[in-house]
Image (tube, rainbow, N blue to C red):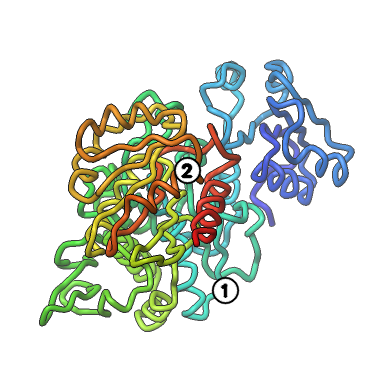
Amino acid sequence: MSLIASDHFRIVVGLGKSGMSLVRFLANRGVSFAVADTRENPPELATLRRDYPQVDVRCGELDVEFLCRADELYVSPGLALATPALQAAAARGVKLSGDIELFARNAKAPIVAITGSNAKSTVTTLVGEMAAAAGKRVAVGGNLGTPALDLLGDDIELYVMELSSFQLETTDHLGAEVATVLNISEDHMDRYSGLPAYHLAKHRVFRGARQVVFNRQDALTRPLMGEGLPCWTFGLGVPDFKGFGLREENGEKYLAFQFQNLMPVRELKIRGAHNQANALAALALGHAVGLPFDAMLSALRQFAGLEHRCQWVRDLDGVAWYNDSKATNVGAALAAIEGLGADIDGKLVLIAGGDGKGADFKDLRGPVAANCRAVVLMGRDRELIAQALGDAVPLVRVASLDEAVQQCRALAQAGDAVLLSPACASFDMFKNYEERGRLFAQAVEDLA
């Protein structure tokens, strides 16, 4: 039985992937609803008109009077809640909600809820693989892959959800079995008034959680609420009670829980200190929901990483090439620069630049100086990065990704790694970060 009153009128605002999942969910339950989108031709319009021709859909500027006919608006994560029409509707008593709130009301199985500025997709996928290895009927999605409402099923034993700050803004009570904020760094500053507002949005993931996991190395991930809840931690230091971390024995580094070594770090296929942290976070979350260590460690040994996330592309003339196109903010790039930099014999040649989304690049300077041989800059905000880096390392400016790859080949020496980790969104030059990563990998494969 769906936990949604069917005698009220709803409006789905935004007809992208999550909006279309809302349409299917509401239509299947006989709920009265309409659809609105600020775009004249939203991505799923043709699908809606084909499959649900009876649904009223309004495209273009949002009509406040139309919105106020609804009891509840399900707002797409792509649309800022600060949009004047939404604010006007809220002021007149219309509830602003989203697909994750609706998912949480209807999910019958425990939820593992994962957010953070970086590494969400890797950790979410890893926990899903661990649950599958343990024989659980697991559903993985949310901000990654399948929209949340499309995952609902009576046979599911565990939900593993990647959640963005935008999704959490419209989620009042998630009620996860275990929730985590993996890390916090400046991102989406074009949508938030500052880091405190972004931080508060992320921390909504902890609302109603029964257990929490936080990062010992990032104070901003420690829950602002939930004193007395079971609490697990992860970090790259030596772990103590209820902690996951790294221990060293006879010159060998191990992933460890409390005082017990679990597996040698060298058995991981994913490279870099940041990926060791990701593995530890996944272990903490899996342990919190009762997954056995043997299944989790087996999944870790098999996991080769996600596409566009510090993904090895090829070795050529003693130089390793890595595609980290998913690093669309400074924090993600820093994780790759420091994580991979500590894991290779030589230096990094970094490709950075694109649409900076209003971010401050000053935090790149120290890690770039310590780990990089040179930085190749491209895209709209390359001069802002150049100003932030100053004279830390040689800077080379290029007009295209192909030119960047050619310059990197000339700059890199045996033992080095070339790293595409842009610290920026891709929209100034590419359709999305996936296209940027694909074109980089293709250019690298094409090198003779």
Number of other residues with Cα within 10 Å of mark 2, as a class: few under 14, some 14 to 19, many 20 or more: some
**Extreme left residue here?**
250
Assign a secondary structure to mark 1.
loop
Q: Amino acid at mark 1?
A: Arg
* Quarter of the figure with residue 201: top left
Please provide percent x and percent y for residue 55: 84, 36
Per the image, the residue denoted by label 1 is: 137
Q: Amino acid at mark 2?
A: Glu
Please provide percent x and percent y for residue 200: 35, 35
User: Residue at (36%, 27%) from the top-left corner?
Assistant: 383
Q: In which quadrant of the rendered image does the N terminus lie?
A: bottom right
Please provide percent x and percent y for residue 195: 32, 31
The answer to whether residue 286 is left or right of residue 63 is left
The answer to whether residue 446 is left or right of residue 328 is right
The answer to whether residue 284 is left or right of residue 218 is right
User: Which of pointers 2 and 1 indicates the residue nearer the eye?
Assistant: 2
Task: Please report contact status of discs 2 and 1: CB closer than 8 Å, yes or no.
Answer: no
Per the image, the residue denoted by label 2 is: 403
Depth check, front residue: 395 or 368: 395
